[in-house]
Image (tube, rainbow, N blue to C red):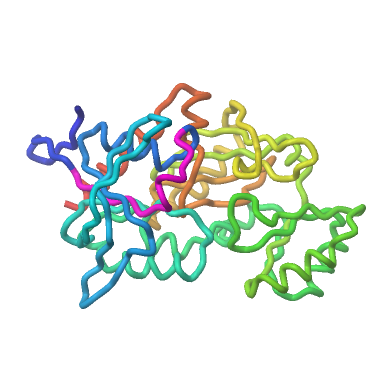
Amino acid sequence: MQHFRTNTGKSMSLKVAIQMDPIENINIDKDSSFVLALEAQKRGHSLYHYHPKTLSFENGVVSARANALEVRRDYDKHYTLGEDEYIDLAKDVDIVLIRQDPPFDMAYITNTHLLEHVADKTLVLNNPEGIRNSPEKLLVTHFPDLIPETLITADEEQIRAFYAKHNNIILKPLFGNGGAQVYHVDEESHNFSTILEMFAEFYREPVIAQKYLPEARNGDKRIILIDGEPAGAVLRVPGKREARANFHAGGSAAKTELTEREEEICKAIGPELKKRGLVFVGIDVIGDYLTEINVTSPTGLQEINALDGVCLEAQLWDAFEKRFKEMG
């Protein structure tokens, strides 16, 4: 059993709280949070699981109604939860992993504010302020030379003008996830106005429109960065008659390597990710262009592990433990 070693050389077991959606619903063959939990347990760290809705602030104390957690790669019973208990996230745990799935809505943002109260005492990963200030489809706009032609607006006339200019675009909600409500609109599409009406009805936020990249038919590349450095990648290939390559939308995984351009992209964004305390990040690249920077709950670990024979969760825990040590 491996333990984290302190400056004195003595091993110690860390207490880790994982803020995530219900663990009973995960797919243990694909879920990245599951293998992160397995690796932490392998190293002798003790685990807690809590749902984001149980996070609370009262009289200066940030707590969560949590359960001690054990995990195993067993399809019949992949987890065991202890009894409900309230844990003080500033005193009772050493590390909090934010692993809840989007949508990146006001509930998600509120939780980052609450977790900021403990971030000077407990290592919170990714950094809650960094998450809040880095929405995945907006953070890319700080790297205009790396992204395809992009429009972000709630103005219907501007969206129509962008469509008229390119005749082949992607429309998607600014804070969506998993490929939900992503639309490919080309010259032969007859539902452009209907899509705009749907966005206007269901979203108060602006829409993001991007020039369609034909390379998307060959798939998009998910690249995992650990502390600003590329650690692995997987090509996500869309199904037939499907514009989306997301695994949630039925995309399949294929082995890949980084191109010179993708190395350049990682080198360009890495320092900013590290500066924001974004230790575990997944970026999406289509052709030569960066399309998203995922900082909330990146996925892809198990697919890359299986294709490349690596263990990215071990590399991540090395980085987490290093950060914890640096906190003192």
Q: Split into 4 quadrants, where in the image is the N terminus? A: top left
- The residue at 78%/68% (across/down) is 196
Pick whichever, 236 or 137, lies toward us. 236
Q: Residue 79 lies in what quarter of the image?
A: top left
Stretch in magenta: 14-28
Q: Position of residue 115 (x, y in %)?
A: 32, 64
In reply to whether residue 211 is colored magenta, the answer given is no
Question: Does residue 15 lie above or below 171 as drawn?
Answer: above
- The residue at 86%/53% (across/down) is 186
From the viewer's perspective, tell me whether residue 51 is left or right of residue 105.
left
Question: Does residue 71 lie above or below 183 as drawn?
Answer: above
Pick whichever, 25 or 233, lies toward us. 25
Q: Position of residue 39 (x, y in %)?
A: 31, 34
Q: Residue 277 lies in what quarter of the image?
A: bottom left
- The residue at 23%/52% (across/down) is 83
Question: Does residue 4 lie above or below 198 as drawn?
Answer: above
- The residue at 73%/61% (across/down) is 209
From the viewer's perspective, tell me whether residue 284 is left or right of residue 73.
right
Q: Position of residue 138 (x, y in %)?
A: 57, 62
From the viewer's perspective, tell me whether residue 36 is left or right of residue 85.
right
In reply to whether residue 16 is colored magenta, the answer given is yes
Can residue 316 be seen from the camera position used here?
no
How many marks on residues?
0
